[in-house]
Amino acid sequence: MLGNLTVNEFLRDYWQKKPLLIRGAFPEFNGLLSPKAAIELACTEDVQARLVTQPDGQFELQHSPFTARDFKGLSKMPWTVLVQGLNHHLPEAAELLKHFDFIPHTRLDDLMVSYAPRGGGVGPHFDSYDVFLLQGLGHRRWQISTQSDHTLIEGAPLRILKDFKVEQEWVLAPGDMLYLPPHCAHNGVAEDDCMTYSIGFRTPAYQELAEQFLIYLQDRICVEGMYADPDLKTQPHPSEISAAMLRQVEQAIRQVRWDKEDVANFLGCYLSEPKPHIYFEPPEPPLSEKKFLKAINANGLLLDLKSQLLCHDNDVFMNGEATPGVGDDYALLRELADRRALPALAGSSGATSAELCGLLYEWYLDGFIHPA
């Protein structure tokens, strides 16, 4: 899928550095769903989708939820529908993502599909994340630029570049793929009925991480004592904050401490946290714990399509919740996180751990995992 490059060569020479066009990356690939199915998915309640139309050449944007009526009468203008999180709803999409496992799961955002008839697109723009653009049905013309001018059209509903200077241009056919590093400007226009699959990798800003880490810390810090000033002196201006108060509060705030373990625990919870619109469906009716364990011992288990399981140094993080110190069960849970599935557990020493059985059953009741 990387052409003549090895994974190491791609990471060394292209990843976060420069674009790469790969002809025939997935030679037999023609897409995962039809345009009709993509529109039906966009009309589903718990799916994030956008509809971009171009009446009179001007871009307009609508957000889900949609109904079938929203897609009627669009033939008079170019338009595009974009459906996020396809891997949360389609097992085939989750399987496709496994081809990209050479990038850590902590970096994965989601798989998005876009459908557009001839002329459809979202305008020249840039993204702040890495993306692989895999062509399914039809053909799309891609224009790219490594320009440093990222000035946007003021007041536009989309982040459209004001002055886009094309440097390279290709038409991608089914199975072709284009990799773009962050901030590489690009413009894709459908040549015919066209579906493109975008595998995006998140690049969180340090400001975002710092803000979220402070929120994480607020429930985990303990600063002893209370402000006191038994030796209080009068001051010429009562409205001024005194140097004595500043010193005392500064010393108190310096009690806030964190270490690598705190940062790792924060990252595990933060990066596995589901997006706000995602919810899980508990089994109805649930199996008893005995029947559940019998089922996974015989047939194995699967992560729910929406679940994210991350690991670090004997701790595991499932959908924003930490389970620290899993001990001898760590290797098995890491395998589940890596492969998003486990084979039949009968005969596995890990499967007989009472702690592991209890944890897996709890995740099953939450809808995070399912018997295979």
Image: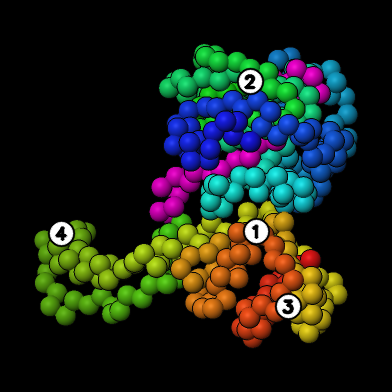
Dot 3, how many residues are within 10 Å of its Cα: few (below 14), some (14-19), or many (20+)?
some
In contact (CB < 8 Å): disc 3 and disc 2: no
Q: Is residue 2 left or right of residue 72?
A: left
Q: Secondary structure at mark 1?
A: helix
What's the CA distance linking mark 1 and mark 4?
A: 66 Å
* Earlier sequence position, callout 1 versus callout 4: 4
Dot 1, how many residues are within 10 Å of its Cα: few (below 14), some (14-19), or many (20+)?
few
In contact (CB < 8 Å): disc 2 and disc 1: no
* Earlier sequence position, callout 3 versus callout 4: 4
* Residue type at the position of mark 3: Ala
Residue 210, percent across and down? 40, 54
Dot 4, how many residues are within 10 Å of its Cα: few (below 14), some (14-19), or many (20+)?
few
* Residue type at the position of mark 2: Trp
* Residue type at the position of mark 1: Arg
The residue shown at (15%, 59%) is 237
Residue nearest the viewer, comparing 203 with 7? 7
Observer-side mark, 2 or 4, equals 2
In which quadrant of the rendered view does residue 53 lie?
top right
Query: Does residue 314 show up?
Result: yes
Q: Quadrant of the N terminus?
A: top right
Q: Which mark is residue 237?
A: 4
* Earlier sequence position, callout 1 versus callout 3: 1
* Residue type at the position of mark 4: His
Residue bounds of the magenta highlight? 189-211
Residue topped by disc 1:
339
